[in-house]
Image (spheres, rainbow, N blue to C red):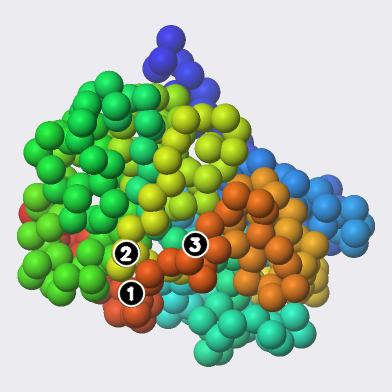
Amino acid sequence: MKGLIKIVSIIGLIAVAGIMAGCSKAENELHVYSIIHEEETKALTDLFTKKTGIPVLFLRASTGELVNRVISEKDNPQADILLGGAVNYHIQADAEGALEAYESPLEKGIPSYAVSPNHTYTGFCVLSLGIGINKPRFEKKFPGTPVPQTWDDLINPTFKGEIVLTNPIASSTAYLFVQNQLQRLGWEKGWEYLSALTPLVGQFPDSGSAPAKLLGTGEYAIGVSYLHAIAKYKSEGFELEVVAPPKTVGDVDCIAIMKNTKHLEEAKKFVDFMLSKEAQELMSSIDFTVPVNPDAKGAEGSVPVSSLDLIDYDVKKAAEQKEEVLTLWSKQVK
């Protein structure tokens, strides 16, 4: 039965991709590759269509898969927009000549860290990493043990099998975590840390959203995830604790227009929409992300950037090292 479900899922993905590549129902239909969750994507695209009259068709998949699609399709793009993904992935796509420059009038006032120097991608929400704790499971598994408050606290043999961390080869969330440790500790000590941590990890799912879900359902006691994802599940009544460790990393989810898009004007309107106060507050209300638009307010319960102890994250270095880091991860760590 599980095999059948998997086959049906694959067929469904191929079918949607085929529709994306085929003729649009409307001449101005916008095609979006979305890395953010389906619920948020649907809410945002529905609102965009309501406001502009422009229909939207989207395909939701993992960061690695969609960024690779964008690069491989750069001469004949099958989508107009890449929605979501951390900065280093957009730098990668831009370096391959897959992104179109566009300076939105709504960039004014947005922090400089959320805007690319050549305007090929723009951040629309702030992301930061943290530790999630399923309190009932943690107390049952580790009675009397303090909840980990720092990244180094995770290196505790007692926690073996009770930590969930995504796979950095497939997930931008986990790659950000890997870079967090390499830049926090330095190259050699960073790899020592990762080599010590990974034997304690019980599961490496591909999806960045998986750790928060698995914590919420009580399958693991500890998870590394975006803080907003943990906060969302906590708001829904799950007994989770949100830990923002010192020397964590902050990044932004970005939006970009595909080079050679056939719907450039519609794509520009969608970028403007995603940078608006209305869109960013809608997204925060669903998933607790922190808006970059200074006029937009984050949802109650979201973790403000001002409360975080962030490292000076070198996004360019993270992008340049990506191939080397992932190769070393595959060979030496996992």
Q: Quadrant of residue 314?
A: bottom left
Q: Which residue is mark 2?
A: 246
Mark 3 or 1: the one toward you: 1
Amino acid type of the residue tagged 3 in the rendering: Leu
**Residue 252 visible in the shown view:** no
SS type, badge 2: loop
Q: Amino acid at mark 2?
A: Pro
Q: Secondary structure at mark 1?
A: loop
Q: In the rendered image, which quarter is residue 265 located in?
A: bottom right
Residue at 23 percent of width and 40 percent of height? 146
Viewer-closest of 9 and 149: 149
Q: Spatial distance from mark 3 to mark 2, Cα to Cα?
A: 15 Å
Nearer the N terminus, badge 3 or badge 2?
3
Q: Residues within 10 Å of mark 2 (few under 14, many from 20)?
A: some
Q: Write down the residue under mark 1.
A: 311
Report how far apart the C-alphas of labels 2 and 1 lie in the structure: 9 Å
Q: Are marks 3 and 1 in contact (CB under 8 Å)?
A: no
| Residue at image coords 81%, 48% | 46
Whether residue 121 is situated above or below residue 175 in the rendered picture: below
The numbered mark at residue 127 is 3
Residue 133: image location, x then y, percent:
36, 38
Task: Please state the horizontal and vertical placement of residue 38, each as a whole percent of the image.
Answer: 63, 42
Compared with residue 207, is residue 280 higher up or lower down, i.e. above or below?
A: below
